[in-house]
């Protein structure tokens, strides 16, 4: 049984920043005590924006807010749904085999490339109230967690690509801007 409003139902949909925007290529700053009051609205806006764009994760920098916050609503490889948010996340463990799987990004709409990611990821941080959280993901969900943590470090998935694959995706990204 669901309690409370659906995440994002009271949030505003923001335009997404696209590849090349400086906020996507600059590490986000940690959420400080003075930022806490704005977190509930930010998390709601992130969910609303993610759902409007049909994504499975969204970092605050993707809506132009350079804070270390992301939301997710992502299945794992066993089709179990994982939904939540993380404030000041730290990717504390990546393990398992490296899988080169298809990856896209809401900030590079319509583009996708095989991107190497570890099959297990563990993220620690806080929720918007300051309570500690620890999230462990495998498969597709592990990919999502690593992808969103990369955003907060000022990286996009194309930074993990090499050679012809990287050139192809960046050429297409430049043509669509």
Image (spheres, grey):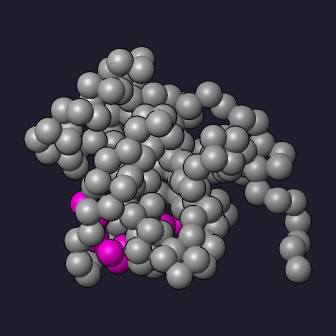
Is most of the magenta stretch helix, strand or loop?
strand
* Closer to us: 83 or 163: 163
Q: Which of the 4 image quarters holds residue 159?
A: top left
Residue at the far left in the pictured view: 163
Specify whether 49 is left or right of 91: right
Q: Quadrant of the C terminus?
A: top left
Rendered location of residue 161, percent (x, y):
20, 46
In the picture shown, does residue 154 fall above or below 139? above
Specify whether 111 is left or right of 56: left
* Closer to us: 131 or 102: 102
| Residue 97 drawn in magenta | no
Rendered location of residue 149, percent (x, y):
39, 56
In the picture shown, does residue 152 fall above or below 136? above
Q: Quadrant of the N terminus?
A: bottom right
Q: Find the magenta span and give its range.
A: 116-126
Q: Residue placed at 14% from the left, 45% from the top?
A: 162
* Closer to us: 40 or 149: 149
Residue 46 visible to an observer of this rendering = no
Rendered location of residue 119, percent (x, y):
32, 75
């Amino acid at each position: 049984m669901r309690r409370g409003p659906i995440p994002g139902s009271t949030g505003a949909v923001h335009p997404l920043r696209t590849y090349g925007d400086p906020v996507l290529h600059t590490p986000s700053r940690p959420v400080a005590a003075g930022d806490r009051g704005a977190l509930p609205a930010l998390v709601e806006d992130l969910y609303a924006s993610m759902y409007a764009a049909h994504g499975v994760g969204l970092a605050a920098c993707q809506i132009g807010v350079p804070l270390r916050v992301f939301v997710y609503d992502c299945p794992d490889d066993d089709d179990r749904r994982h939904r939540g948010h993380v404030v000041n996340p730290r990717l504390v463990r990546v393990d398992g085999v490296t899988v080169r799987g298809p990856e896209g990004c809401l900030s590079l709409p319509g583009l996708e490339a095989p991107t190497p990611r570890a099959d297990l990821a563990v993220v620690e941080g806080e929720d918007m109230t300051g309570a500690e959280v620890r999230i462990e993901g495998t498969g597709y969900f592990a990919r999502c967690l690593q992808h969103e943590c990369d955003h907060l470090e000022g990286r996009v998935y194309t930074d993990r690509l090499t050679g012809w694959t990287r050139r192809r995706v960046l050429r297409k990204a430049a043509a669509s801007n």
